[in-house]
Amino acid sequence: MPLYEFRCEKCKRVMQCLCRMGTNGKGLVCPECGARRMRRIMSVFSARVAGGKASPALSGSSCSTCTSGNCAHCH
């Protein structure tokens, strides 16, 4: 089963859930506010390339000038 990320439409909390393929968040409850409006979001992933090193462009790593952990300048 894949690990999906969901964001609460009410309080904006992001949570991870091990769900069946294609799950859209229906039936999930926000652990923060109890709302039932969860939306599946895109999440970062890591990929191995030749040589066994993770590609920074695919792993979501950031540069030293980024405060959010993921910006357009990092990649």
Image: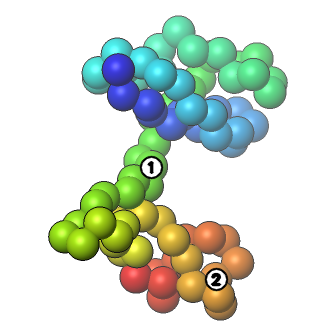
- Where is residue 42 drawn, in percent x and y? 41, 47
Q: Earlier in the sequence, mark 1 or mark 2?
A: 1
Q: How is the image coloured?
A: rainbow
- Where is residue 55 drawn, in percent x and y? 34, 71
- Say whether residue 9 is visible: no
Look at 47% across and 22% down and name the residue there: 18
Look at 64% across and 40% down and name the residue there: 14
| Residue 50 versus residue 1 in the image, above or below | below
Look at 70% across and 78% down and name the residue there: 67
Left or right relative to 68: residue 31: right
| Residue 68 versus residue 17 in the image, above or below | below
Look at 62% across and 70% down and name the residue there: 69
Q: Which numbered dot is residue 66?
A: 2
Report the front residue among 71 and 39: 71
- Say whether residue 45 is visible: yes
Q: Residue furthest front?
A: 51
| Residue 29 versus residue 13 in the image, above or below | above
**Mark 1 — residue?**
43
Report the front residue among 16 and 49: 49
Is disc 1 surrounded by few (<14), some (14 to 19) or many (20+) residues within 10 Å?
Answer: few
Left or right relative to 53: residue 3: right
- Where is residue 15 drawn, in percent x and y? 62, 34
Under circle 2, the secondary element is loop
Amino acid at circle 1: Ser
